[in-house]
Image: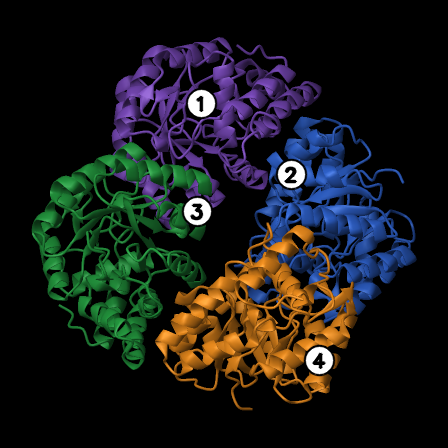
Chain colours: A purple, B green, C orange, D blue
Amino acid sequence: MKKIQGIIPPMITPLLGEDTIDRKGAEQLVERMIAGGVHALFLLGTTGESQSLSLACRYEFVELVCGLVAGRVPVLVGITETSLTESVKLAEKAKECGAAGVVAAAPYYFAPSQQELIDYYTALADRSPLPLYLYNMPSHVKVFLEAKTVAALAEHPNIVGLKDSSANMNYFAQLTYLLREKPDFALYVGPEELTGEAVLMGADGGVNGGANMFPELYVAMYNAAKAHDIEKVKELQKQIMAISTTIYTVGKWGSSYLKGVKCACSLLGIISDDFLPLPYKKFEAEERAKIAAALKAIGAEVK
Amino acid sequence: MKKIQGIIPPMITPLLGEDTIDRKGAEQLVERMIAGGVHALFLLGTTGESQSLSLACRYEFVELVCGLVAGRVPVLVGITETSLTESVKLAEKAKECGAAGVVAAAPYYFAPSQQELIDYYTALADRSPLPLYLYNMPSHVKVFLEAKTVAALAEHPNIVGLKDSSANMNYFAQLTYLLREKPDFALYVGPEELTGEAVLMGADGGVNGGANMFPELYVAMYNAAKAHDIEKVKELQKQIMAISTTIYTVGKWGSSYLKGVKCACSLLGIISDDFLPLPYKKFEAEERAKIAAALKAIGAEVK
Amino acid sequence: MKKIQGIIPPMITPLLGEDTIDRKGAEQLVERMIAGGVHALFLLGTTGESQSLSLACRYEFVELVCGLVAGRVPVLVGITETSLTESVKLAEKAKECGAAGVVAAAPYYFAPSQQELIDYYTALADRSPLPLYLYNMPSHVKVFLEAKTVAALAEHPNIVGLKDSSANMNYFAQLTYLLREKPDFALYVGPEELTGEAVLMGADGGVNGGANMFPELYVAMYNAAKAHDIEKVKELQKQIMAISTTIYTVGKWGSSYLKGVKCACSLLGIISDDFLPLPYKKFEAEERAKIAAALKAIGAEVK
Amino acid sequence: MKKIQGIIPPMITPLLGEDTIDRKGAEQLVERMIAGGVHALFLLGTTGESQSLSLACRYEFVELVCGLVAGRVPVLVGITETSLTESVKLAEKAKECGAAGVVAAAPYYFAPSQQELIDYYTALADRSPLPLYLYNMPSHVKVFLEAKTVAALAEHPNIVGLKDSSANMNYFAQLTYLLREKPDFALYVGPEELTGEAVLMGADGGVNGGANMFPELYVAMYNAAKAHDIEKVKELQKQIMAISTTIYTVGKWGSSYLKGVKCACSLLGIISDDFLPLPYKKFEAEERAKIAAALKAIGAEVK
């Protein structure tokens, strides 16, 4: 498989209620992102609130989205679970539905040591019927996939890349350096605020939540960085930061980002409702008005 | 239901391999603990490695153990999950098998705010067919169930108690104080090193992993503390610390406790094998010899 | 020197302004605590806001209080600094003024490893002209003095005890157990919410901030626990928790405890002003009214 | 004062023993860095181990280095302390010696809230006779100077810039965005692994420890990034990472970086000895040999 490069939106999971998928919203969202030029899709990640969905709902969503995409771009599926068995089953489902790869953060209840992470990921890669991407998400899983651990795992033939959501670019610089002899191993950055600089320095792309709302913007950033057009990168960066510092900061708690993206997608008319499964709840009228104002301020049309 | 008081061992899950229950080991373990005088059993907690088991395996284990116990002591079942739906389904299974209550730590991928925790637990208690015990496990779930949050949740008619594994006794003292007008709300302490002092200060008991190996010891501690026999408490505390500072500290990483308890149970002949699901692995020969030596040092008979 | 046992208040530093000691307030506070039966005094600890004072001010305060106490009870002096040289100079000053011992938390800018902590404390104990007490304060210094580290340091002839402010009683239980053959090594607990249970389990006393306000209460708790009078311990515990859950929780931030104790001392007429050096500031009228109400609720006379 | 742009090495403090400055080493180091084209010097920062030095030693070092530099480049002096008074005194000394500015991390014993940080820095800037640079160093001081806090403080006429050592580039991107209308406010990045990308995205320079050893390399990186020469940036980045992943990782603990830089400087013949004050100690023969090998591997001449 050719290495995927570019913008891979971590797709939100449009819901009408608990474990009830908004199938029309999903379709509209997929079409919007593909029309916006994204290079792949990533389902059931943190932005997809995978952990808050029942397993049955996750299976349904994989099937739905793979069908909607119908091979136009590669689909990556999040299989993060604390049980290896459940992760492998999700990977099998993804394979069956035609996905191109699977993505797994570390098991997130216990906090394994680096050696235990190597053992775990090796077993997962051995059993996964699809290529596996590592996912460094220390704020949610409590452990860091250290750069040396990633370098060791990159030797496994079925481990093909990593998404880093740490925002620690010293770490990312280490990865880029340690894996410099592995040009087929993909390195993606999670926070969209960093896609520009990461791609300038050699990363393969961004897994950026904002691309649910504005896919063209992030694709433009990827292209500008790839082309070493620094002035364009700086100009686009201002637009990205205008989103990041408003839409993602309306709520009071750590859930602001998730609530903000879903609320914006519903205001933009992409999805029917911005239902979030517990432990979160969608914004109420006051915050919704702030999101609407933020969208208008950046020139978006609110429905 | 009468409040459960005393020692409630967090039962290990005896396994022959991945998601393969050691049914004979489970039976021997249940019989040993009941013979040792424990006041209830707690399945599928942290010590039970619930998060590392497939859901099917968890269902099987609930059914098995409830059948083995056959009503001799109350059985509490861990339903900790990140998906509310999956937690409720586990609670329904527990109810169907005759369990007396269910236990849930906070959803452990996202890190909810205190208000979000209240919303989450309220929804869970509303839907649970069995009384719900809160479980404060900040090292694994990243958030603390603050004392005021617990006090608010204690108003819910289906929330009946809390197990605290924080080892922060300032917090436990706050709980004891804030809930002093709620004598039916149960407060249990997780770390066995603290059962003595917690019960002296008014706690209802201990959810102590060591009771898988030596149920009588922890029951004796509970009784001594309940009877305000300080000299006896201090004497038993030395025995408990002799276990805690040896058997739980052989490994290099945070998994030492889990590996130590299972290894000891297999050396004592209670279970057939000390298999641990990934991300952990059972001790190898060198560490096993150290556990054996530690057991002999405290006078236990190693098989 | 005989081991100090009992209540050792961590004395606040009464101030009229930045680095300006309230000498009359200090005198009244010292007399109140000695009249209340405290067993020793501890100056320039966390409650004494030592780190926020200039070195000159700290020297002045040591001289003042040692003079006021005039040998009636032992005085311990906090010498916590990040520079070993400055710590030793403070210890020399303490010795010159007649103090009985010095107390040092770990250097708190860098986060040393356990071996580096052993090297550091060994050098400090070697050079200190007074017996040295270790001070475990992980929330402020970022590192835990692990139980094995303390046990190793307890071999040094000039290291005579430890104050633990972690509130982690599993750790304290480990210390008690590992040091059981060192009856001359003193173990004190910091959080006053834990003095009762710690002394019941064998601790030597409490370094309790509330004793600035109500020395008799904490002395009574020490005596009840020492006498194994559990009913009395539980009764006094309620009084201590009534203080802890009100006076220490009025502010919004981590500084609530410090501001609360100083505000209460000024409302009780012990000190002239409740000035706190930056980064903190004393409570304004609204919070001050809440402290006054809390004091009245527990029957204290507010001036 | 014109905004300083470029490489500002955080100078190590060459020592012959505790609080004994290696004056010849300091001179050689200063000359090497100035000859290497650095744009300013920063004394008494984290790399300068300021917190481990006595105040007298810090005063001596400021005087010495300002004299050696003699106005050839601006000198910034670290005044980080937990006592405001001591910080102001250090700032006065810096002014007296001819320094151009002072740098302060947050008070590092207590963990202030954001509002308390604003109060603290405002008072410090009011009293400082030299322009003040903020220093975000969350790993050592426990608190993050949030982007909004920095933006608020940037309104103070005597606060002129910030050094960020968090390595969190999402935060740095926020700073760059929020301060886009303040072109005179300087933003420097601490980790040298990030100087390239930070300057590409608009930062003013790097406070990079490696410039003690190889000033030209970091100056070249600054120039390449400033000129938007991405290919050159990538090439230099490999050299910087070759240093970072070897010389800074020889030790076992968090002190590896400090020990590595000093050891390398002594091997390069810049300083006479690589003495580190406690809680750290210089490398022993085995680690020293590894540093020598790493230096040789990157083509440096070891003496």
C-alpha separation, residue under disc 2 versus residue under disc 4: 51 Å
- Left or right, D205 with respect to B36, comes to right
Tags 4 and 3 on a common chain = no
SS at mark 1 in the image: loop
- Whether B172 is drawn above or below A235: the answer is below
| Spatial separation of the CA atoms under disc 3 and disc 1 | 38 Å
Q: Relative to A40, is D92 on the left or the right? A: right
**Count of marks overlaid on the render:** 4
Distance CA(mark 2)–CA(mark 1): 26 Å
Q: Is residue A58 above or below residue C75?
A: above
- Find residue B143 and name its label: 3
Residue under label 1:
A3
Q: Would you say the residues marked 2 and 4 are in contact, meaning their CB atoms lie under 8 Å apart?
A: no
> What is the chain letter for disc 4?
C
Closer to viewer: mark 3 or mark 1: 3
What subunit carries mark 3?
A: B
